[in-house]
Amino acid sequence: MRFDNRPIGVFDSGIGGLTVTRLIRQQIPGENILYIGDTAHLPYGDKPVPELMWLARRLMDFLAEHQAKVIVAACNTSSSVSIDLLRDRYSVPIIGVVKPGVRAAVRASRNRRIGVLATEATARSSAYRREILALEGNAMVWEVACPGLVPVVEAGRMEDPEVRKLISSYLQVPLENQADTIILGCTHYPYLRPVIEEVTGGEPNIIDPAVETVNELKQTLDHLQGYANRDTGSARFFATGPIDSFINVGSRFYGNDLREIENVDI
Ligand code: DGL
């Protein structure tokens, strides 16, 4: 049996990828994790595709230089617009979040009506629609761009009354159309899950792609015989810009490990 003690790399624009990282730590605690949040360029959702590709490559270079054995693009925006290009350019296996989220949603939906809450760039790319239709040709899909939600999460203002109003307006069309499944198509949105569930009244399935993403990560490590041979790994966190939300908001979700975050210029 082979093993690989190099770290798993994870990237996002900010604290969104922590929603995936927390699950990796819970499910495969022996692994070391290297996390980078590109807070100098947050939010990603309103940026044009060429810029998003350039941003993703810097993060990939950083994680590859740090010997990541597999990289999780824990950002729907990057996954939607750049994953094919990244897979062409880098030899390290890359796990995105869109396909796993779609698999989970298609499995959960009974009426094949699926809503996707996402950033503007993700919604514009139609990546979710494409992947859903590839698995379920008869599905109806509403991809809703949700400007404003990422800054709200980064600022830790999840409980503001305005946020509830914003979320109600974003969910209106999918809910009016009886969508029975809503995908949280941005890794920041699980922070808003309590408000989203309040607005939906617990009716539709709420899909956090993190769950299936971590399943795919485990399958990849199985396939590569790439698990670490230790019981307890560690996590290192880097940010390219401000670290306040990592410490204040991220640690509410993730726990105290985040106090050790390092600033990095890439
Ligand atoms: N958390 C990211 C995503 O899943 C990025 C959001 C942003 O920076 O706009 O899309």
Image (cartoon, rainbow, N blue to C red):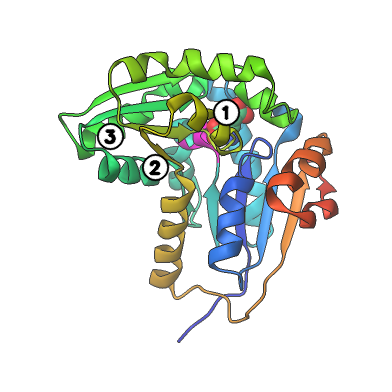
> Residue 131, image x and y in percent?
30, 35
**Where is mark 3, residue-wise?**
132
Quarter of the image where the N terminus is located: bottom left
Which is more N-terminal, label 2 or label 3? Answer: 2
At label 2, the amino acid type is: Gly
Position of 32 with respect to 98 (left or right) is: right
Highlighted magenta segment, given as a residue range: 75-79
Name the secondary structure under disc 1: helix
**Relative to 54, residue 216 above or below:** below
How far separated are the C-alphas under marks 3 and 2?
9 Å
How far separated are the C-alphas under marks 1 and 2?
21 Å
**Where is mark 1, residue-wise?**
52
The crowd level at tag 1 (other Cα within 10 Å; few <14, some 14-19, many 20+) is many
Position of 264 with respect to 76 (left or right) is: right
Which is more N-terminal, label 2 or label 1? Answer: 1
At label 3, the amino acid type is: Ile
Was residue 124 drawn as part of the magenta stretch in this picture? Answer: no
**Where is mark 2, residue-wise?**
101
